[in-house]
Amino acid sequence: MIKECGVGYFQFETKEDGLYINVYPPKEGKKATSIDDVMYYIDKKQINCDIVKLDEAIKQGRSTVASVKVSPEQVHTYSEFGDYRISRDGMKVEAVFYPPFIGADLLSVDEIVRDLEYIGIKHGIQESVIKDFVATREYGKAYTVALGSEPRNGSDGYIEYKFDIDLKPSPKMNDDGTVDFHSLENINHVSKGDVVAVLHPEDRGDAGMDVLGRKVNPAKVNHVIFRFGRNMVISEDGLKLISQVSGHVILEGDKIFVSNVLELVDVDNSTGDIDYEGDVNIKGNILAGFTVKASGDVIVNGIMEGATVIAGGSITFNRGVQGMNKAVIKAGGNIVSKFIESAESVTAGGDIESDSILHSKVISKGTIRATGRNGLIIGGDVKAIVSIEAKTIGNSMGTNTTVGVGVDPAMKRRVDELKKSLGQLGDNKIQLNQVLTALRKKQQAEGELSPDKKELQAKTMRNVIMLEQEINKQKKEFEEIRGQLGEEKNASIKVSNTCFVGTKIMFGDLCMFVKEKYDHCQFRKEGADIKCMAL
């Protein structure tokens, strides 16, 4: 009897008169031996037995020790052995152990390990499990005596987009229940240097090993790369996609595009107002009430109605402006339009060119030219720093028309104000720097300033920084105005056809009313008078 075993088990015994089976009942709570285990044993060892007597012995042995002769033959005795089964995937070996004939040998841990090595097991032998069997001898139980190392599965690579890839314009509901079609937020704006996408590389995982020592690869993962157009660059570590321009970013399929030119069909309820860092190209029209702002140039191929267009660069209206007395246009550079009609305000930092300017308020820091096929300036208030050129100014009906060149007197007053202000700011800066110098000397002498002196030092430094910013701002404005004052010296108004009665001519603060029709003429300032002379 095997003392270590707590489960029910059997042992064959060879005696002089034949083969016996001894069946031992299980200890409390343990499993009794089964006929299936015995049948497997005799089939494995090719032992001939009386099956009926075997079954009787097994049944009897469930509650008491039974010893039954099952064959008159004397059989070769067998030691304890294990039946080893490798799983189909090679990741596990299970062993079911069978008891020895009475008087035969038991397996040791080393012998079981050698058995496993003999059948080709090279990895993952579970010696603790084997020792557990040797300690308890539970026959008929499946022991996991070898385990492969599972591979560590990785994860797919993916791209994290730093902009809204599902951008869908939707109007905002106002508090009063009306719908605001102006603020649709339908553009993914991007600034130069912005990260537009981040690549998260795939984790390929780690290979495992099966019990036969074979490499087990982890599951395949998806490898991803940036797919992108122009105006972007990949960071040195290869993980960030950076915009090289200010503009907008879009995703088409899996490809990223950044452009500093925004192209639209129309500006209307489908787009809302536009505020863009770059150039804007509008293929159609700008409907009344909408606003387009751009840091660069704006090109409108259709009609601009009573809308607002503000550009840091130049503005071009290929079909013209029908302003409805509401249009507001402001360009840092030039303005070119087929015609300008009924505009509330048109202001250019450069020149303005149009075939006709009708009933509009127009201001240019350079030259205004209405020299196209019609070349009309009728009605409104048209002023330029350098010159105005037109075929016809006013009309035969005497429509009130004001054209002026030179610098507004208010600008001259502003120059004087800036001179005075810059002087005062300079004096203030000197005083603040003197305070800082005194505090630095005190700090060098005493090693450390008192808390109130430290606070004074910090406050003074902040004031110096703010003062320098204001000085630079005013200096820039002063230089711009002074440059314009220089340009007005040769200011002129040229009319290649006719200047009609009802026209008001202005040179700065000088004023002249045209009381008779003039043909092919130009107006210039001579001393304190405005003179009309032939071209």
Image (cartoon, rainbow, N blue to C red):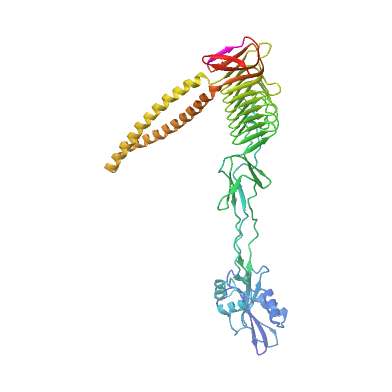
Give the residue at x 59% y 83%: 105
Give the residue at x 65% y 28%: 336
Q: Which residue is the extreme one toward the bottom? A: 16
Residue 228: x, y in percent?
A: 64, 47
Stretch in magenta: 509-514
Q: Which residue is the extreme one toward the front? A: 534
- Figure check: 65 above or below 204: below
Question: Which quadrant holds residue 90?
Answer: bottom right
The quarter of the picture where the C terminus appears is top right
Q: Is residue 307 visible?
A: no
**Which is nearer the eye, 122 or 375?**
375
**Number of on-image labels:** 0
Residue 5 among those drawn in magenta:
no
Give the residue at x 61% y 44%: 231
| Magenta-drawn stretch, dominant element (helix, strand or loop) | strand
Residue 333: x, y in percent?
A: 59, 30
Residue 6: x, y in percent?
A: 57, 73
**Which is nearer the eye, 355 or 428?**
355
- Figure check: 520 above or below 25: above
Q: Is residue 322 left or right of residue 442?
A: right
Question: Which quadrant holds residue 155?
Answer: bottom right
Question: Which quadrant holds residue 156?
Answer: bottom right
Q: Which residue is the extreme one toward the top? A: 515
Q: Is residue 162 visible?
A: yes
Residue 52: x, y in percent?
A: 72, 78
